[in-house]
Image (cartoon, rainbow, N blue to C red):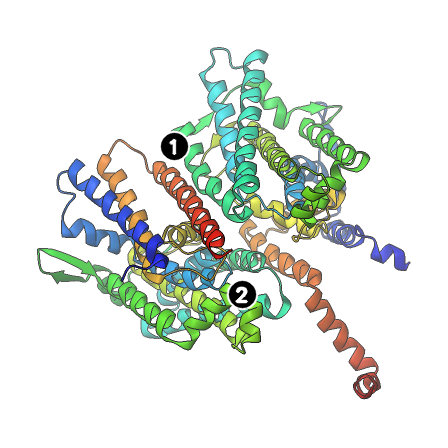
Amino acid sequence: MYNRKYLPILVTFGLFVLIFAAGSFRYTGFFSSQVFLNLLIDNSFLLITAVGMTFVIVSGGIDLSVGSVIALTTMISASLVQNQGWPPFVVIPLVLATGAFFGWIMGAIIHYFKVQPFIVTLAGMFLARGLCYVISINTITIDDAFYTKVAQTKIPLPGNASVSISVLIALAVVAIALYLAHYTRFGRSVYAIGGSEQSALLMGLPVARTQILVYTLSGFCSALAGVVFTFYMLSGYGLHAVGMELDTIAAVVIGGTLLTGGVGFVIGTFFGVLIQGVIQTIISFEGTLSSWWTKIVIGLLLFFFILLQRLFSSRRKTIRS
Amino acid sequence: MNRMFRHHLFWPLAILAALLLFNLFYSPDFFNIVMRNGHMYGSLIDILNFGAPLVLVAIGMTLVIATKGIDLSVGSIVAIAGALACLTISRGTDQNALSLVLSAVGLTVGLSFFLGAWNGFLVATTGIQPIIATLILMVAGRGIAQLITSGQIITVTSDTYNYIGNGALAALPFSIFIVAAIYLIVSLLTRKTALGLFIESVGCNPQASRLIGIRSRLIIITVYMFCGLCAGIAGLILSSNVASADGNNAGLWYELDAILAVVIGGTSLNGGRFYLTGTVIGALIIQTLTTTIYMIGVPPEITLVVKAFVVLTVCLIQSEVFRKKVVQRWKTRRYPAEREVSRHV
């Protein structure tokens, strides 16, 4: 079953295992199922966003608005639930629709007016952040019964470990995304457009629909991540998730997705997120290292993986020619 | 008349004029300038003073964008520069000593050169897309800045250092002179020598430029180094203005403001063409907008919403497809027969 195209994923997976093993040898109490599950618990929102971003990057675009959309979602949920007293089962579908709509508009502008995705989503990033402050400049704390219950519910697992509901949502998103990417027409079209938009168009693939759907999906994922983030923080704030877009892109790149589009796997992104999580865990286990080391290490990893990508893509070219 | 409309500076200048006109009606004392202790005070001076770092970063960004690149790391370089300068000064025994401040400035300029060169090296020799290559330093840079300041906000009490961002020369803020000097040097270098042409040529097609004998790589590395330098000096001005360095928040979202200024100034993100004067006006527009919003009394964070619409509008106007669609609609509305005729030809 060995296939060259799985090599980047194997590198990512191997690196994760290596870092996790190194941590286990160095720190007592590191090698436990709960530490591993905490990776998922603390990064479930990152995982959901990164899955949406994987589709965007595979299609050859980029979405810088994800962090702001998360903040906007927490803000809308908090103000509607807390200040207006709306029931959560109305608010959650509403914010999900808002996120998807936001992505849809950006996708439409990118496709129909041929403006660079980078700039359009940059404007979207400004807009969503600004809208947060239009709602309120201060933190809105949520003490709604439903939200606190979801936040505190622990699902026990064998081996004295437990996960939160957010993890189940994130894993479901990964599963659906895997199906979407590899077993549907939509997924194939995304890869085709990422490979070459021109060829995809000439093949008769629905380029317009797919491209707009990709950004809609990313907006939806960000909104869903925002809902999960609301469970995690139990508050809405305009400065939530600042810089998340970079973490997300880093996770996708570390997961082996090519930034030029056309190549990438959802499962790679999954391990990319886990690698970021395990680095944070090691730094907190170390105790003496400060949190900013996380940024430096992630920057270095990003560098390493981008160089690796260059190596792979240039070697592939020489083989072809 | 038509030529005036077509001039590339027309729209940026018109926007700036409209903003100033609005201020004139909204608060008549906007244009007042008072002299106090040999300093000039007033909203216009504030705009120039607070806008100085942005103008600088935007000038550097213009050249990078002209080579079809982009530099996302300027905000982080601003933070690193401020952190290094403040750390060096706070370690000194006599914070007011000129030699100490000069060595701090020298160190910072050197480091920002190096950071710019790193970006340039990644873009030019490894062939990584500029967005991604500079993303690395953008992520890691904030960490480095916090590493330098150990996560604290370093304050300095050096009057000499404070002069860079707050001092006055001939009653005008000193920072304006730094910016003016750099703007003059760059415009002379790019418009009176072939350098500007080389940069535009590399932006159009690096491969072809190399074949006609331009050292594309060298040009690209130089441009990124210059952008790093501009960001470093902007970091010096910003940190000396508030007499402290904050690794987390200094220069946050500066890269976006700078890109916005460049785009408003008429430089296309597709490279190959650049307008330095347009960029300066673009940066001034952004600063005027921010000041105006402060003065109206709207929460300053709302600026983001306004900026979002400005970016979108400017980009849509630059988009050829959008222009064609709009023009087509006007035309069909005015001459309904034209479509019919062209269809039968």
Q: In which quarter of the image is the C terminus of chain B?
A: bottom right
- Which of these two is toward me, B249 or A36? A36
Q: Mark 1 lies on which chain?
A: B
Name the residue tied to disc 1.
Answer: B151
- Residue type pointed to by label 2: Ser
Q: Name which residue type carries label 1.
A: Gly
Q: In what element is the residue under mark 1?
A: loop
> Could you classify mark 2 by the number of other residues whose Cα lies within 10 Å: few (under 14), some (14-19), or many (20 or more)?
some
Q: Nearer the viewer, residue A72 or A317?
A: A317
**Residue B165, how many percent across, how many down?**
62, 28
- Distance, label 2 to label 1, CA atoms, is 45 Å
Which residue lies under the disc numbered 2? A196
Based on the displayed image, in which of its 4 quarters is residue B173 positioned?
top right
**Does any portion of residue A157 appear in the rendered image?**
yes
Identify the residue at horizontal 75%, vertical 39% (top origin): B196
Chain that bears disc 2: A
Q: How many marks?
A: 2
